[in-house]
C-alpha cells in the first residue's frame, strides 16, 4: 500500500510550518505510531529545534560539494529503516549533485511508493504555476520550484496561517532570521504589502485545491485550455499562464509544440529550453504533444479541434518571431472562430537572428560531396545546352535546359547557397558559350543584361518555391517515417508468438525510432549480467522497481553515462532498455516510451495466454488421469481374472487334466501376462512422452533397421500371420529417437495383428520424398469403421470390433504413436483401402539427413 502525504504549507518562511509538523509528529508518537525525523532544516529558532528532541532522528547524508560538506536527506536510510511516518522538511528543495534525484520531492515519491507516510513542509511561492504571479508581487525569481500536481494530489494539506503584523513582530524580534538579515528580508518578501499579497495567494491556492477535489466527484468540464509553445526563451510564461487558466476554469490542460524544418537550425540551448517547457507543462498536469509539420497554424488547428480546445494561449513578442506569428494567429482565428485566444506578452531577450541562422546554415551545408554534386549537375546542364545549340534549338530552349539544372540543384542541395552559386554558373556559362562575343565573359547590350536579370528573377522565385517544397517534404518524410515506425512496431508485435520474438522485434523498432543502439534486458539478466557495474545495476534495478526512466537525460541519477527505460504497461514489467552515451530529445523519449508500452502490453498478453494454456493443459492432464485409472482398473482386472482362473484349474485338476488342456491353459496364462506387459509398457510410454521433462534423443539411424527390430519384437504375437518389410535393402537415413520409434512401430504392427485374420498378411513400407519420410503399415483385415476413423489417434480411445479381445484396452497405443511422431515434427495418418487398412506416419527431413545421404 502506498504511503500518505501530508503537506504543511504557508505563504512565507517563519510562519511555523516546521513547528506545526513537529507538533503533529509528537501527537502521532503519543498515540503509539512509529515516527522518525528524516531531515529537518537546521533552524536558528530554539522553540522549533526543541521539538526535535524526543523523536528518533536518522543521520543525514553527507555530500561533498565544492570543498564543502553538505547535509541532506539520506533516502537509503529512510527506506532501510521503513518507519510508519517520516518527517521531511522543505519539499521543494533541490538536491546536491551526485544524489539519486535532482529534487527532494522525487525522494518523497520513492518513500511513498515504499509504503511510508510522509509529513513535509512547503512555501506556496515554490509552486511552478505561481512563478509569474510571485515575481510580479515580490520582484524576485524563485529558483526552487515544485510541480503543482504534488500539492494537488497530496492526501492532506494543512495551511499554517499567521497574520502579517504578527509575522512582522516575530521577524523584528529575531525569531525568524538573525538580526543582520532582518533588513534584507524586509526589502524582499517581508514588507507588509507583499506579505498580504502572498497570504491571499496561499488562501486562494488552497481554496482552488479544495474546489478541484470536490470537482473530481462531479461530471467533467466543458473547458479545455491549449498552450502553444514556440522556441522563445521566455515561453515558460505561456505554459504557466495556460495552467493557471485551466485550474481557474476547472478545465483540462494541453500543450503543443510544432516542430518545423527550422527546428534543426536552433542551437542546443534553445532545443533544451523547448524540452524544459514541455516538461514543465507535464509537471503542471498538462498533456503534451510534440508534432512535426511545415504549417504551424494548421497543426495547431488540427490538434485544437481534436482535443476540443475552447481557450488557446499563445505568446506575443515584438521580435521577428512574432511578425511570423501574427499570420499564424489570423489563420487560427479564421479556422476556429469559436475558440478564445489569450495572448501572453513575452520578453524580447536575445533571439535566434537571421545572421545566426545564416551562419548555422552555411556551417552545416558546406561539404565537398554536395558541392561536387551541384557542380556535376550544372556541367551536365551546360553540356546538354551545347548539344541543343548544335541541333539548332533556339535561345529559349537553351535557357530552359540551363535553368532545369539550377532547379535540380535547388531541390537536392542542403542549402540555398548551392542554387545561388548555380545561378552564377548558369549566367556565366550562358554568356560564355551562347552570347557574342563567344568565349568571353563580357556583357554587350541592354538586351543581354535584361536576359540575365530575368534569369536571376525567375531562378530566384523557382528556387525559393523548390526550397519550400523540399523543406515541406523533409518534414513530412521525417514525421511519416516516425509514424510508420510506430505502426510497424504494432504489426511486428502482433505477429510475434513468444516473448523472445517480441523482444527481437522491439530491438529493431528501437533502432528505427531513435536510431540509437540499445540493449534489452530481463530482470533476471540484470541481476547476473557481467558487463554491468554495480552502480549501473543499481540504476537499472531502481528503474524497474519504480517503473520510471533513470540515468542520463532524466531527473534521476542524471550524471550516469547510461539511460534506462522500463518496458512496462501499468504495473506489468517485461524488461528494461539500456542506452549508453545517448542523448534523446523529448520527442524521441515519448516515441520510445510509446513503443515500450506497446511491447509490454503484447508481452503481457502472450504471458497470460501461456498461463491460460498451462491451466488448460493441467486440467487435461487431470482428466486423463481419471480416465487412465478407470482404464487400468479394467485392463488389469480382466487378464488377472483369466490368469487366476487358469491357475485354479491347473491346481484343482492336478494330474487328471489332459496334456492338451494343460498346454492351452498355460498358453492363456502366457498370453494374458504378455497383454499386461504391453499395457504397462504403454502406460510407461505415455507417462514419459507427456512429461514436461521429456526430451528426444535424436540420432541419425536407418529407418529400415528400426522397422526390422519392431517386426522381431512382434514375432511372438503374429501367429500364422505374415509380417514383412517391403524393400528391406533400402537405407533411409532419418534423425530420430530410435528406441521410441521402435515402440511406435510395435504399436502399429500390434494394432494390425489385432484386426487381421490369423492367416492374414501385414506389410511395412518406407518411402522417401524430397521433403518427407513416410512409413506405412498395411494389412488385409476388416478395415477401420469410418465412424471411428477420425478418433483412433486420440488418447484412451478404443474402438469396438467383432473380436472380443480387440475391444479390451484403454487405447494408449496409437495415442503414444501420435505423441512421439509429433515430437519429431511429423504427423499420423490412417485410411482404408480395397484390401483392409493402412496406418502410418510422415516425418520431415532435416538438413543433417540430407547431408548424411549425400555422403
Image (cartoon, helix red, strand yellow):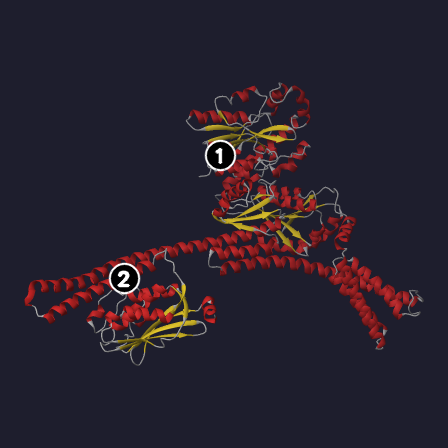
Query: With 362 as the anchor, is 214 left or right in this view?
Result: left
Give the camera-side residue of 541 and 458. 541
Residue receiving disc 1? 79
Q: Residue furthest left?
A: 656
Residue 376 appears anywhere in the view: yes
Q: Position of residue 418 (x, y in %)?
A: 79, 59
Q: Position of residue 293 (x, y in %)?
A: 66, 56
> How far is disc 1 from disc 2 in space, using C-alphas?
60 Å
Q: Residue at x 80, y 68 (%)?
A: 381
Quarter of the image for residue 792 reads: bottom left
Mark positioned earlier in the residue sequence (1 or 2): 1
Mark 1: secondary structure: helix
**Residue 94, placed above or below residue 434:** above
Residue 118 appears anywhere in the view: no
Tags 1 and 2 touching, CB below 8 Å: no
Structural crowding at the residue carrying mark 1, measured as other residues with C-alpha within 10 Å and reported as few (<14), some (14–19) or many (≥20): some
Q: Position of residue 232 (x, y in %)?
A: 70, 45
Q: Position of residue 677 (x, y in %)?
A: 24, 62
Mark 2: secondary structure: helix
Q: Residue furthest bottom?
A: 834
Give the camera-side residue of 479 and 553. 553
Query: With 807 as the anchor, is 276 left or right in this view?
Result: right
Q: Residue furthest top?
A: 173
Structural crowding at the residue carrying mark 2, measured as other residues with C-alpha within 10 Å and reported as few (<14), some (14–19) or many (≥20): some
In the image, which disc is placed on residue 174? none
Q: Residue at x 51, y 46 (%)?
A: 529
**Which label sits in the foreground, 1 or 2?**
2
Quarter of the image for residue 456 reads: bottom right
Residue receiving disc 2? 681
Amino acid at each position: 500500500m502506498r504511503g500518505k502525504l501530508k503537506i504543511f504549507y504557508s505563504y512565507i518562511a517563519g510562519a511555523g510550518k516546521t513547528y506545526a509538523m513537529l507538533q503533529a509528529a509528537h501527537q502521532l508518537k503519543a498515540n503509539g505510531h512509529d515516527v522518525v525525523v528524516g531531515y529537518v532544516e537546521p533552524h536558528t529558532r530554539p522553540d522549533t529545534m526543541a521539538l526535535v528532541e524526543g523523536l528518533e532522528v536518522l543521520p543525514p547524508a553527507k555530500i561533498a560539494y565544492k570543498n564543502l560538506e553538505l547535509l541532506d536527506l539520506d533516502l537509503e536510510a529512510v527506506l532501510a529503516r521503513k518507519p510508519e511516518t517520516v518527517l521531511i522538511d522543505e519539499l521543494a528543495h533541490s538536491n546536491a549533485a551526485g544524489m539519486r534525484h535532482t529534487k527532494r520531492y522525487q525522494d518523497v515519491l520513492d518513500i511513498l511508493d515504499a509504503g511510508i507516510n510522509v509529513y513535509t513542509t512547503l512555501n506556496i511561492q515554490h509552486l511552478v504555476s505561481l512563478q509569474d504571479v510571485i515575481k510580479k508581487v515580490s520582484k524576485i525569481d524563485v529558483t526552487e520550484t515544485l510541480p503543482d500536481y504534488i500539492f494537488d494530489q497530496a492526501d492532506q494539506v494543512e495551511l499554517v496561517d499567521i497574520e502579517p503584523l504578527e509575522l512582522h513582530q516575530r521577524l523584528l524580534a529575531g525569531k525568524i532570521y538573525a538580526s543582520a538579515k532582518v533588513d534584507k528580508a524586509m526589502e524582499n518578501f517581508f514588507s507588509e504589502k507583499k506579505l498580504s499579497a502572498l497570504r491571499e495567494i496561499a488562501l486562494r491556492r488552497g481554496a482552488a485545491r479544495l474546489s478541484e477535489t470536490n470537482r473530481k466527484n462531479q461530471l467533467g468540464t466543458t473547458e479545455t485550455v491549449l498552450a502553444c509553445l514556440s522556441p522563445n526563451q521566455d515561453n515558460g510564461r505561456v505554459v504557466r499562464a495556460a495552467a493557471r487558466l485551466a485550474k481557474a476554469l476547472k478545465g483540462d490542460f494541453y500543450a503543443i509544440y510544432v516542430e518545423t524544418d527550422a527546428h534543426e537550425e536552433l542551437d542546443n540551448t534553445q532545443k533544451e529550453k523547448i524540452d524544459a517547457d514541455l516538461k514543465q507543462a507535464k509537471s503542471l498536469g498538462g498533456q503534451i504533444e510534440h508534432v512535426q509539420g511545415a504549417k504551424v497554424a494548421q497543426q495547431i488547428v488540427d490538434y485544437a479541434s481534436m482535443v476540443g480546445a475552447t481557450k488557446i494561449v499563445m505568446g506575443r513578442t515584438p521580435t521577428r518571431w512574432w511578425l511570423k506569428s501574427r499570420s499564424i494567429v489570423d489563420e487560427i482565428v479564421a479556422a476556429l472562430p469559436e475558440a478564445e485566444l489569450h495572448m501572453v506578452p513575452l520578453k524580447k531577450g536575445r533571439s535566434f537572428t537571421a545572421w545566426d541562422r545564416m551562419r548555422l546554415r552555411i556551417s552545416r551545408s558546406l561539404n565537398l560531396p554536395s558541392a561536387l554534386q551541384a557542380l556535376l549537375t550544372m556541367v551536365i546542364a551546360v553540356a546538354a545546352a551545347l548539344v541543343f545549340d548544335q541541333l539548332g534549338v533556339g535561345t529559349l530552349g537553351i535557357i530552359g535546359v540551363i535553368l532545369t539544372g539550377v532547379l535540380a540543384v535547388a531541390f537536392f542541395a542542403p542549402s540555398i547557397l548551392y542554387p545561388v552559386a548555380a545561378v552564377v554558373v548558369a549566367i556565366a556559362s550562358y554568356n560564355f558559350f551562347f552570347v557574342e562575343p563567344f568565349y568571353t565573359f563580357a556583357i554587350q547590350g541592354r538586351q543581354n543584361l535584361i536576359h540575365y536579370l530575368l534569369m536571376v528573377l525567375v531562378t530566384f522565385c523557382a528556387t525559393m518555391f523548390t526550397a519550400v517544397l523540399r523543406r515541406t517534404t523533409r518534414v513530412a518524410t521525417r514525421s511519416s517515417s516516425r509514424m510508420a515506425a510506430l505502426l510497424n512496431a504494432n504489426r511486428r508485435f502482433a505477429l510475434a508468438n513468444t516473448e523472445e520474438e517480441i523482444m527481437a522485434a522491439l530491438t529493431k523498432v528501437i533502432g528505427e525510432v531513435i536510431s540509437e543502439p540499445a540493449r534489452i534486458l530481463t530482470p533476471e539478466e540484470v541481476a547476473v549480467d557481467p558487463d554491468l557495474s554495480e552502480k549501473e545495476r543499481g540504476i537499472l534495478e531502481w528503474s524497474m522497481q519504480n517503473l520510471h526512466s533513470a540515468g542520463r537525460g532524466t531527473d534521476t541519477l542524471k550524471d550516469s553515462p547510461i539511460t534506462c527505460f522500463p518496458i512496462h504497461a501499468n504495473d506489468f514489467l517485461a524488461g528494461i532498455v539500456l542506452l549508453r552515451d545517448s542523448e534523446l530529445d523529448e520527442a524521441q523519449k515519448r516515441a520510445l516510451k510509446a513503443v515500450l508500452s506497446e511491447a509490454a502490453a503484447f508481452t503481457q498478453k502472450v504471458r497470460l495466454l501461456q498461463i491460460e494454456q498451462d491451466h488448460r493443459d493441467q486440467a487435461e492432464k487431470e482428466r486423463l488421469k481419471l480416465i487412465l485409472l478407470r482404464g487400468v482398473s479394467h485392463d488389469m482386472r480382466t487378464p488377472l481374472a483369466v490368469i487366476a482362473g487358469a491357475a485354479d484349474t491347473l491346481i484343482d485338476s492336478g494330474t487328471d487334466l489332459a496334456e492338451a488342456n494343460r498346454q492351452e491353459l498355460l498358453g492363456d496364462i502366457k498370453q494374458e501376462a504378455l497383454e499386461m506387459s504391453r499395457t504397462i509398457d504403454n502406460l510407461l510410454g505415455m507417462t514419459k512422452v507427456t512429461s514436461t521433462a521429456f526430451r528426444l534423443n535424436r540420432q541419425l539411424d536407418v529407418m529400415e533397421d528400426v522397422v526390422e527390430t519392431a517386426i522381431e519384437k512382434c514375432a511372438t504375437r503374429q501367429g500364422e500371420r505374415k509380417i514383412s518389410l517391403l524393400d528391406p535393402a533400402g537405407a533411409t537415413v532419418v534423425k530420430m529417437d530410435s528406441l521410441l520409434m521402435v515402440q511406435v512401430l510395435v504399436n502399429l504392427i500390434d494394432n494390425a495383428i489385432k484386426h487381421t485374420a490369423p492367416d492374414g498378411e501385414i506389410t511395412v513400407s518406407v518411402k522417401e520424398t524430397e521433403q518427407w519420410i513416410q512409413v506405412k503399415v498395411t494389412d488385409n483385415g476388416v478395415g477401420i469403421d469410418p465412424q471411428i476413423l477420425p478418433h483412433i489417434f486420440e488418447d484412451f480411445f478404443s474402438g469396438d470390433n467383432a473380436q472380443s479381445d480387440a475391444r479390451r484396452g484403454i487405447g494408449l497405443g496409437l495415442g503414444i504413436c501420435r505423441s512421439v511422431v509429433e515430437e519429431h515434427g511429423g504427423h499420423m495418418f490412417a485410411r482404408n483401402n480395397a484390401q483392409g487398412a493402412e496406418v502410418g506416419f510422415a516425418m520431415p527431413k532435416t538438413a543433417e539427413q540430407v547431408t548424411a545421404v549425400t555422403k
